[in-house]
Amino acid sequence: MSHGFTKIQEQAIPELASVAHVYRHDKTGARVLSIVNDDENKVFGISFRTPPEDSTGVAHILEHSVLCGSDKYPVKEPFVELLKGSLQTFLNALTFPDKTCYPVASANTQDFYNLIDVYLDAVFHPRLTPNTLKQEGWHYELEAPDKPITYKGVVYNEMKGAYSSPDSLLYEHSQQSLFPDTTYGIDSGGDPLVIPSLTFKQFMAFHEDHYHPSNAYAYFYGDDDPEKRLEILDAVFSEYEKINVEKTRVPLQGRFDEAKQVRKPYPASERLAKGMFTVNWLLAETADANLNLALHILEHILIGLPSSPLKKALMDSGLGDDLAGVGLEADMRQMFFSVGLKGMHPSNAIKAESVIFHAIKDLVENGIAAEDIEAAVNSVEFALRENNTGSYPRGLSLMFQALSTWLYDDEECEGDPLTLLPFEEPLKNVKAWIANGEKIFEELLARLFLHNPHRTTVLLEPDHQMAAKIAHKEANRLIKVKDSLSAEQVEKVIADAAELSRLQGEPDSPEALNTIPRLSVADLPRENRPIPTEEREIAGAPLLFHDLPTNGIAYFDLGFDLSVLPAELLPYAGVFGRALTESGTAKRDYVDLSQWIARTSGGIWAQPFAAPVRGSAKAASRLFLRAKATGDKLAETVEILTEILTSATLDNKERLTRIVSEARARAEQHLVPAGHQVVATRLRARTHAAHAMEEAMSGLSNLDFLRSLEERLEADFRGVAKDLERMRSLLLSRSGLIVNATMDADLFAAAEPELASVASALPESDAAPASGFPLDFPAREGLAIPAQVNYVGKGVSLAEHGITLGGAAQVVNKLIRTGYLWEKVRVQGGAYGAFCLLDRLAGAMAMVSYRDPNVAATVKAFDGVADYLETIDVNADELEKSIIGAIGEIDAYQLPDAKGFTALTRYLTGQDDDYLQEIREQALSATEADFRAFAEAVRVNAAHGDICVLGDSLAMENADLDLEIRQVL
C-alpha cells in the first residue's frame, strides 16, 4: 500500500516504452491508472461515469459548470485563468455518452501540478449556484415587460449549432437507433428542445451522485514522480467515504430480433434536396483485444481507402456524393459499425442499402483480396507503432483508449484499463491467423454483419420548412411561458437576467485571482528552442534536413511552387492533389495504386499551402506531396512517389467526377460545424495575396468553384482534363521544387539518395510566377445557411494603416481572447466561443465568434475591445499571466514530424531563428503600454473592418448591418 492506495496490477508495455500501474484507493474505491515513461508532455485526467437518464444535457452542462469556480479557487472562471497564464499543452473538458473527462497536460512539471490542483478542486468542490446553471445551461432572458422572452445559455446555443449540422444529427440518430434501452439512446450533449426542462435540483443531484471518488477514474502519464501522483490524489480522495455507485454502471444493450428502420428530417434550404443514410450494426463488447484489433483492420479493409471494396461499391453506384457514417465506433461498451451515403436522393435509400449488402455478401462468398488485407494490416500496424496523435498529447489518446475498457464493470468482473494498450500480442495473433489461411475477416462479416439482426437503417431527409418550424415552435413555447407569468413573475425574470448580467460583468477580486497557482515570468526560458535544420541541395533543388528522433520513421515532403499557376487554375489545387494519389498511373489503376501505397507506406497525401512571406506582399505557396515510411520501405515509397509524379492519370472522367463530388459534399458539410473557419478565411483573403490564394483553394470561393466544376465535367470534360494537364506541366518540375526530410541522421543517410532519385526524375521548367489572384467580395457580407446559430466576423488589414504586429501583440491578444471576448461574447452573449486572430506576417486582424445566437451585438462587442484595452487595469499580475500564456503558445508542444514541417513553413515564410527570438523577447518584455497601443489597431478594425457573417438569414436581416446576403447552402 502506498499513500492510501493498493496496487492491483503492474505491467510493462514495451511497445509504448512505458510501465503501467493500476491502483485502488482503499477508503473510497477510486481507481487510478499511472503510466510511467520518459515523455516530458505529462498528462493527468480525472474522469467520471456519467450516463444521463434524459436529453436535458445535464452531464454536458455540469462539465462546463464545475469549471466556473471552486472552494479553493473562488474566481468566476478558473479554467480561463489557466488558459491565460499556463504553459499547458492541453486544457479542456469533454462530455461523452457515458463519461465526462477533465484532462490537462503540460511539459513543465510545476505547471502540471498547478493544473491538477485546480482541476481536482473544480470537480469535487465546485461553487454551483442557480446562476451557474443559467449561464452555462439555460435561462430566460427578458429586457422589458413589452419585449419577447428568449432562451439564453452557452450549452443551449452550442447544441443548437450541433442540431444544425446534418452530420451530427446523422451520427446521433444512428447511435440512438442501435441503443434504444441504454444511455447511448439519448443525447448526453442535450437536445435544445429538452434542455430548458432541466431544473437546478436535478443539476445538483447529478453532481452529488456522480462526482465522487467512488465513481472516479484518475489517470497519469509521463515523466513526473509516480509517488507524488498518489500523494496528490489521496489528499483529495481521503476527504470522502465510499458510496454505492451501482446506478452509474452502463448496462449492455439487449439484442434485436429483427432489423429496424428510422426516418428523420433535418433542416435544409430550398437548394438542397438531398438526404443521407446509414446502415448500422451493433457488433460486440469493446474489451476483447483480439476482436477489437481485427475489427479495426476490417474497417480499413471495407472503407479505409478509395479502392476499398465497400467504399468503392457505394461510390461507384453513383447514388450519392460521399460516404456517410463513422465506420467503427469503439469508444463505448459495445462497438458498432455505421456506413452509408450522403448527398443522396432519399428515394434511393433502398438501392444504396442493397449495394452495401451485395458488397458484403460478395466478400463473404468470394473472399477478400489478399492485397486488401495486407494493405489494411500494414496501415493499422503503422499507425499503432507511429503513435502519432497530431496536436493531441500522446498520453491523452492512451487515456481515452484505457477508458474504453476500464469504465465498464459488472458484478462478476472489474473493467481493465490495460486490455487494449499493449498491441503486440493481438497483432501477432491476427497476423498468425492470416498466415495460416484462416478467413477471420470473412467470418466476422458473416457473423457480425450479414447474419446480424441487430441492425438499423437510418434515413435523414431534407425538410425545407424545418428551420422555420423549429423557430416557430420555440417562439410559441416562449409566448406560452410569458403568458403564464404574473406581472410580478415577469419582473422577477427581468431582475434575475439583469442580476446574472451584473454578476457576469463583475470582476474577480485581486485576492480571489491570487489563489490561482501559476508560474512566474522568471520561470520561463528566455531562449527559443530552434528546430534543427540543415540546408542542403539535392538534384539541383533545395533540401531541408531536420535531425530528429522519429522512432525509425522517415517523414518527407516534396513542395511544388503554386505561384506559377494562373488564377483560373489555382482553385484546382485540392482536386489536382487528390487526383495524383487517387486516380492511378500509367502502369496501374487507382485500386492497385491505393493498395500499393497502403501496403508500403504510412500514407502519401497532397496538401496545398499558402502563407505570407515576412515583410513582403508575396506569398509562399506550395502543393506538398507528403509521405511517411519505415526505413525498410523507404525505397519502395520513393518508387511510388516517382510513379505518381511522372505518370499520374489525370483524364479518368469517372474518378475525377467522384473526387470533385466528394470534395464539394465535404465543403458543404464543413460550413455548419466549422463556420468560424469559413468566415476567418474569407476575411483574411482581403488582407494578403497568400490568403486570397487560401480562399481560392479551400474557402467558400472553392466551394463555388467545385459546384461549377461538377457541371463542367459533364459539359466539357476535355477542357477540364486539359486544365489538369496544363497544371502538371507548370507545377510538377524540379525548378520550383523544395524537399523536406525529418528523421534521424542514420535514416537520412539511406534516404538522401532515394530522395535525389525522385527529384532527378522531374523535368525542368521555365514557368514564371503568374499574376495575382483578385477576389471581389462585398465589404459587408452575409452568407446564409440553414442553421440556428451564426458565425460572426470582422477583420481588417492593419498593414494598410501602418500598423505592424510583434510579440507584444500576442500577449495582448491572450488577454483579449480570454478576458473581454470570453466575457462579452461567450459568457454574456451566450455564444460557444470567440477568437481574435492575429496574422503577424500579413499584418492583419480578425475577430470571429462560434455558434453565436447574436449578430449585431457581437459586432458591437468586437468594436468595444479598444475601450476595454484603454481602460482595463493591466496590473502586474494580469500582465504576467498574459505573458506566460503567450509564451505557452510560442512553445506549443509538437511531435517530431510536426516540428519538421513547421521548420519548413518558417523557412518558406522568412521566419528565421533571429526573428523568432525577437518575437519571444518582445513577448517577455511586454508592458502595460503595449495594451494601450494595441487599442489603436482595434480602432482601425472598428472603423475600417469588413464584416462577414455565416448563419441564419433572418438573424442577419434583423441585425441592421447593411449586409449583402446570399444563400450559400
Image (tube, grey):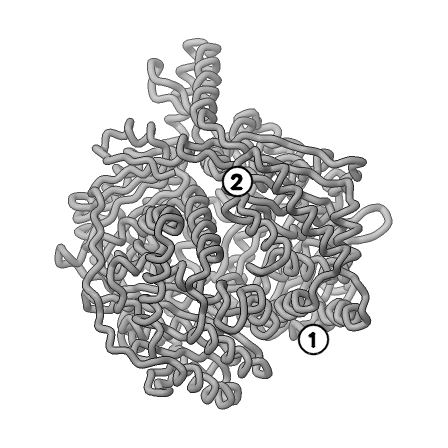
Tag 2 or tag 1, which sits nearer the N-term?
1
Residue 882 shows up from this direction: yes
- Give amino acid for label 2: Met
Looking at the rendered structure, the kind of residue marked 1 is Pro
Which element type, helix, strand or loop, lies under badge 2?
Answer: strand
Specify whether residue 95 is in view.
no
- The residue that label 2 is drawn on is 344
Report which quarter residue 533 is drawn in: bottom left
Task: Please tell me how crowded label 2 is: few (under 14), some (14-19), or many (20+) other residues with Cα within 10 Å.
Answer: many
The CA distance from mark 1 to mark 2 is: 47 Å
Which disc, if any, is residue 615?
Answer: none
**Residue at x-position 35% and y-position 66%:** 725
For this rendering, which residue is in front, 315 or 817? 315
Q: Residue at x 80, y 69 (%)?
A: 437
In this rendering, is residue 187 above or below 539? Answer: above
User: Which element type, helix, strand or loop, lies under badge 1?
Assistant: helix
Task: Identify which residue, 770 or 472, lies in the foreground.
Answer: 770
- Residue at point 33%, 57% (across, down): 719
Q: Position of residue 770 (x, y in %)?
A: 21, 66
Q: In x, y percent, where is residue 9?
A: 78, 65
Question: For this view, does 57 lie left or right of residue 267?
Answer: right
Q: Nearer the viewer, residue 838 or 65?
A: 838
Q: Position of residue 393 (x, y in %)?
A: 54, 63
> As drawn, is 434 to the left or to the right of 545?
right
Q: Which residue is mark 1?
A: 14
Q: Nearer the viewer, mark 1 or mark 2?
A: 2
The quarter in which the N terminus is drawn is: bottom right
